[in-house]
């Protein structure tokens, strides 16, 4: 398995491409937007330079990693030689179903099709193809070059052989793969998102402020960052999307998104990506937003 195609050149896509290329795989990074691809390559270069400065890699590894990445705006051209395709597009079911239908047509029959989805059913995605046994989830954590975990999600039809192949491939990336079954939110987000949602409810109900909630979780629970800051990094729109999947999938009101989260997303306050969420990120540094609008 030498040829990897990554669909989507955003934060997750360029991170996945970076890690595979750094470990000697040939990577086709695919996005319909040429400007997004250019930005992705620039980001990868910056991240490699950071690794170089920290002594994690040497100059030869940096240069070889960049040589291992080719960019494409045409999906069919980008995936036609792939042994493994990893979809890292928008967390939207319709988009993913359309992509996997195309991938089933454009890739060679033996190719494995993976999704980096953080919550959408792998079984449902696999149903859009004629090869459900070769469809699997590879949920990388952000930032991909740093975080060790990869959630490997088995769909209802995913074969043992494909699962073991992806587990072994993940280890070649110096990652720690954990096999989980296909239920809403898998493990990471089934546990994480209700915590983030409860933190937002605590803010919404006036229990404490943004900084106070995050400080309690950092100092009291030894979390590296508080849940509200983490939500800003994940993207409040992504948090909302995952909570909706959990709420719909389990039918349990405990997963219902907090009204404050819904309102913030509708207002376009999505966290780091928009420059404002629970904190202001407009000056590329975290600033606390002291606003009454967070509370009821």
Image (cartoon, rainbow, N blue to C red):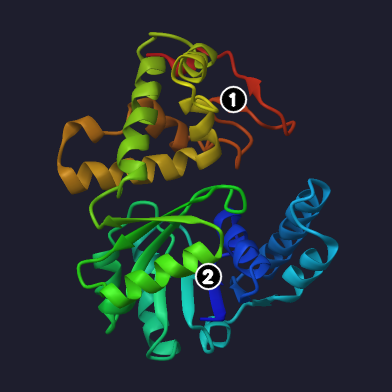
Q: Quadrant of residue 272?
A: top right
The secondary element bearing badge 2 is classed as strand
In the picture, the quarter occupied by the C terminus is top left
Q: Nearer the viewer, mark 2 or mark 1?
A: 2
Sequence order check: which comes first, mark 2 or mark 1?
Answer: 2
Q: Describe residue 71's horizontal placement relative to residue 101 as left or right.
A: right
Residue lying furthest top: 207
Of the pair 134 and 248, the residue shown nearer to us: 134
Above or below: residue 118 compared with residue 65:
above
Of the pair 17 and 74, the residue shown nearer to us: 17
Q: Neighbour class for label 1 at 10 Å: few (<14), some, many (≥20)?
A: many
In the picture of the structure, the residue carrying the numbered disc 2 is: 7
Query: Whole-Å distance between the Cαs marked 2 and 1?
Result: 30 Å
Above or below: residue 192 compared with residue 103:
above
In the picture of the structure, the residue carrying the numbered disc 1 is: 279
Residue at image x 27%, y 73%?
Answer: 160
Q: Neighbour class for label 2 at 10 Å: few (<14), some, many (≥20)?
A: many
Residue at image x 27%, y 78%?
Answer: 133
Q: Are marks 2 and 1 in contact (CB under 8 Å)?
A: no
Residue 78: x percent and y percent?
A: 57, 82
Q: Describe residue 105's horizontal placement relative to residue 181 as left or right.
A: right
């Amino acid at each position: 398995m030498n040829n990897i195609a990554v669909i989507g050149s955003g934060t997750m896509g360029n991170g996945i491409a970076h890690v595979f290329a750094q470990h000697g795989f040939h990577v086709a990074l695919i996005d319909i937007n040429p400007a997004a691809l250019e930005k992705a390559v620039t980001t990868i270069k910056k991240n490699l330079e950071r690794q170089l400065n920290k002594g994690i890699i040497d100059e030869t590894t940096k240069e070889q990693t960049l040589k291992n990445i080719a960019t494409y705006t045409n999906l069919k051209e980008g995936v036609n030689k792939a042994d493994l395709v990893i979809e890292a597009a928008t967390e939207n079911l319709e988009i993913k179903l359309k992509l996997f239908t195309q991938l089933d047509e454009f890739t060679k029959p033996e190719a494995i099709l993976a999704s980096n989805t953080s919550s959408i059913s792998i079984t449902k995605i696999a149903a859009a193809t004629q090869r459900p046994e070769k469809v699997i989830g590879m949920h990388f954590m952000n930032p991909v070059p740093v975080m060790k975990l990869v959630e490997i999600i088995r769909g209802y039809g995913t074969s043992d052989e494909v699962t073991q192949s992806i587990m072994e491939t993940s280890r070649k990336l110096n990652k720690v793969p954990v096999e989980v079954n296909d239920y809403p939110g898998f493990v990471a987000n089934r546990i994480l998102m209700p915590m983030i949602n409860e933190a937002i409810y605590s803010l919404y109900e006036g229990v404490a402020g943004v900084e106070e909630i995050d400080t309690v979780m950092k100092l009291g629970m030894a979390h590296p960052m508080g849940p509200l800051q983490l939500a800003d990094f994940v993207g409040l729109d992504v948090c909302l999307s995952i909570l909706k999947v959990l709420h719909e999938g389990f039918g349990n009101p405990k997963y219902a998104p907090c009204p404050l989260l819904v309102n913030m997303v509708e207002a376009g306050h999505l966290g780091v990506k928009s420059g404002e969420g629970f904190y202001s990120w407009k000056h590329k540094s975290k600033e606390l937003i002291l606003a009454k609008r967070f509370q009821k």
